[in-house]
Amino acid sequence: MQFFYEIALVVLCTVSTADLQAATTTTGFGFELLQAQLEAFESRMQTQLDALQKHIKLNQNEIENFKSLGAEMLLNKDSGVYYVNLIPSPNKSFEVYRDGSNNHGFGSNWTVFQNRFDGSVDFNRNWTAYKNGFGDIRREHWLGLEKLKRILDTERHELLIIMEDFEGVTAYAKYDNFRIGNETEKYVLQSLGTHTGIVGDAMSSHLNYKFATFDQDTAGKCATTYMSGGWFFTCYHSNLNGIYLKGGKQSSNKGIHWYHFRGYHYSLKKTKMMVRPFAQRSKG
């Protein structure tokens, strides 16, 4: 900018000198006219310089915004909504949300089948809703047991569960061989594999138990009692589809719970359940 301004001043001085020399041989009126022209020229130059400076500032802001967007894209390089068609047919495709963040060092490309973070979606749903899915896959949602089953049937999958309390503490649990049965089998929890993570295993006690909702409950009536859908024994160590209760610590044991992370009397703020092909575990 300073360089352009200096060039403009040089041009202005050159023109001024030449015209002033000419003006000394003419009348005083000619000198006054030249002075007025020079002032008008200087005003135009200043306006153009101001406009150029504003344009440069706007470009700098755009560059900074682009850098910020680029950093976000690198952090979540493949997050977003994808269509999957596991049985090639125009009527068999469905949308899923893939999480592309690093996920505590476990890498990206996780398909999210449960996401909760603000209580905007009621998870006390009937069998049909849990089978087909509900909510907005870009926000709070349950993908659907039938879709989940179709994904898991393609190959061995691992399960990652990420949780957060109202104090901002995050925990996770991972299982390396997650499988469920079909609808006839009530989507029974068939396998979890080996557990790893920074919190204890609250899922394995649910192994070999059928999925239940209030309209297709088990003998213990756990789904009805805790207003949730899930794999229950009598009744649970994990109830991530429980009632959304704000504030964390509760006087009752009805809420979003993972027994080994804040116990039965603390309802969690955020939960996310995701699956990924086991073969991708080393690729991130």
Image (cartoon, rainbow, N blue to C red):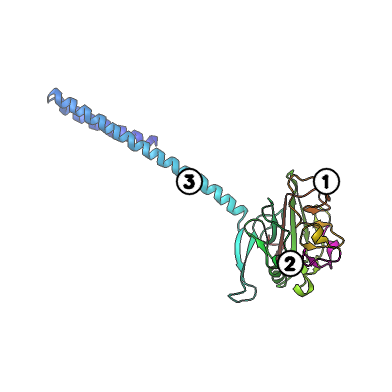
Residue 49: x %, y % from top left: 35, 36
Q: Is residue 206 located in the magenta-colored stretch of the structure?
A: yes
Q: Nearer the viewer, residue 262 or 69?
A: 262
Q: Nearer the viewer, residue 187 or 41?
A: 187
The amino acid pointed to by label 2 is Trp
Which comes before the other along the chain, label 2 or label 1?
A: 2
The CA span between labels 2 and 1 is 29 Å
Residue 19: x %, y % from top left: 19, 30
Which comes before the other along the chain, label 3 or label 1?
A: 3
* SS label for mark 2: helix
Badge 1 density bin: few <14, some 14–19, many ≥20, Cα 10 Å? few
**Discs 2/3, front:** 2
The CA span between labels 2 and 3 is 50 Å
Residue 165: x %, y % from top left: 75, 47
Residue positioned most to the left: 26
Q: Residue at x 25, y 32 (%)?
A: 40
Can see residue 182?
Answer: no
Residue labelled with disc 1 = 251
SS assignment for the magenta stretch, majority:
loop
Residue labelled with disc 3 = 62
Can see residue 146?
Answer: yes
* SS label for mark 1: loop
Q: Is residue 176 above or below residue 243?
A: below
Residue labelled with disc 2 = 127
**Residue span colored magenta:** 202-219
Q: Is residue 20 above or below residue 155?
A: above
Residue 76: x %, y % from top left: 62, 55
**Discs 3/1, front:** 1
Quadrant including the N terminus: top left
